[in-house]
Amino acid sequence: MIIRLENVELAYGRGWTLSGIDFSVPEGDFLAIVGPNGSGKSTLLKAMLGIIKPRHGEVKRAPGIRFGYVPQSQHIDEIYPLTALDITLMGRYSLMGPLSRPSRKDRETALGCLSDVGMGHLADQPYRNLSGGQKQRTLIARALACESRVMILDEPTNDMDIAGEAAIMDLLHHLHKEHGMTVVMVSHLLNVVSGYAKNIALIIDGKITVGTVDDILSPVNLATAYGTEVRVADMEGHRIVIAGGTRC
Amino acid sequence: MLNTFQDPFMRSALMASLIVGAVCAYLGVHVVLRRVVFVGAMLSQVSAAGIGLALLFGLNPSLISLALTIVGVIIFSFRSTDRRTTRESLIGVGYVMASALAVLFVAKSAQGEAHLLDVLSGNILTVMPQEIMYMAIVAGVVACLHFAFGKQFLFTGLDADTARAAGYRSGAWDLLFFLTLGVTIALAIRLAGALLVFGFLVVPAVTALLITDRLGRAYGIAIAAAGVATFAGLNLSFTKDLPSGPTIVAVLSVILVITAGVRKLCH
């Protein structure tokens, strides 16, 4: 197991709680955490990373395994005069001594990570000048640079057009399939994650239900979670989730 | 210009201004990037309140000012989780409270309001060699800490959550950063006054960040701008019989306006 949550209770927002969280993320999984806005998806992700402490229960992470965290790209303040390479190098910081500065090897590794995500040619570009998709790729490169085996992402396709969404999801799929990376991601885009994830954790009324995509993405589960009528259709092998009643 | 600095008191003022300018300009880049510009103003006023408190009770102004500033830093460095208030509003509250206390303490002290102007606007021309030595020591310690832990300050300032996920104690690094800032301000304000210290913290950093996309260069440009303004400002102050601190700040502002204008023309 990469991560094990045992009877975890989390508090977030104004008195909201997630309780009875009890599930594991096995090595090699591709888990998508989904749920309505404000349901505590990002809070759960931060608890899995150890950024916030649970009110009750325990979050166990496999020892010796590094986690690469990819926050929402808008969390990176663009006022900082940093290049894509500078940002990626931050992924190396935790591997250096407290007093060390980035070495040539660190720079080469960071450049390699940028190349892996198709950003090698933009390494010297200011981060603030990059497009939304390029910024997201840079943050994924930073997560790779810490030699992580687990990638944890918070809404990696936020504010992207459909081509950008597909490109980022294809990149994550590539890292998962070709590099054996365990992927845990938060998303509110059910149609996007359903085509890539192996398992889904759906937050319903402060509780979490985890299972395969087929088990979780049922009209009944989704209608309960989102409080609206939901239909799930199949189109040429792709699962399509449609919310709301029948319209003309 | 060289004639200006033949008098010993002007050489002392130059040395003190260069040290304060360099360390504040460097820290100012961090302050502007962290979007806590007014924390500099707030800590300046907290430090001034400490001086006022010391004058009121006949205590050592430097020690009390330093102690009060450190307390202010510790309180400020806690990240509020209450969504009904923002960090900016807390800085504003701290600023007005400290400003009011500084005025009240000084007004009630034996030295009275005659001392108030020196506390708030400072007088770099009356600086003593021992004060310059203390400032140089503090600047050296700050420089060493930032050289050693620059990556921690940068990472936790830019992206506290990811830094925490990578094993950094973001709160502790924030506290250390603001302690270096607070101690610098507490000492610098005794030499240069609140106005000049705040000017050195903000204007050179904004000037630098307008014209470069590289962090390393931003530090260099900010320090250079503070140095040029110090030379020109003290010279103007001496030849035109103007107050030194406000003149240096005026020159810093002229450099910023020219830089912004040139940048606008080039783009």
Image: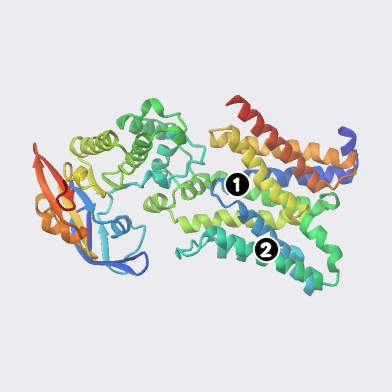
Q: Is residue B44 visible in this depiction of the protein?
A: yes
Vertical position of residue A210 compared to residue B151: above or below:
below
Residue A41 percent location from the top left of the image: 28, 56
Identify the amino acid type marked 2: Val
Q: Is residue B67 visible in this depiction of the protein?
A: no
Residue displayed at 10% across by 45% down:
A233
Q: Quadrant of the C terminus of chain B?
A: top right
Residue B192 percent location from the top left of the image: 77, 52
Q: Are marks 2 and 1 on the same chain?
A: yes
- Which circle, 2 or 1, is nearer the viewer? 2
Q: What residue sits right under mark 2 in the picture?
A: B46
Mark 2–mark 1 Cα distance, whole angstroms, equals: 25 Å
Q: Quadrant of the N terminus of chain B?
A: top right
Mark number, residue B144 = 1
Chain designation of label 1: B
Vertical position of residue B25 compared to residue B181: above or below:
above
Asked which secondary structure carries label 1, the reply is: helix
On the picture, is A12 further left or further right than B26? left
Asked which secondary structure carries label 2, the reply is: helix
Identify the amino acid type marked 1: Cys
Quarter of image, res A36 = bottom left
On the picture, is B98 further left or further right than A233? right
Residue displayed at 50% across by 63% down:
B85
Quarter of image, res B46 = bottom right
- Nearer to me, A189 or B160: A189
Callout 1: few (<14), some (14-19), or many (20+) C-alpha neighbours within 10 Å?
A: few
- Nearer to me, B112 or A60: B112
- The mark that comes first in sequence, 2 or 1, is 2
On the picture, is A39 further left or further right than B77? left
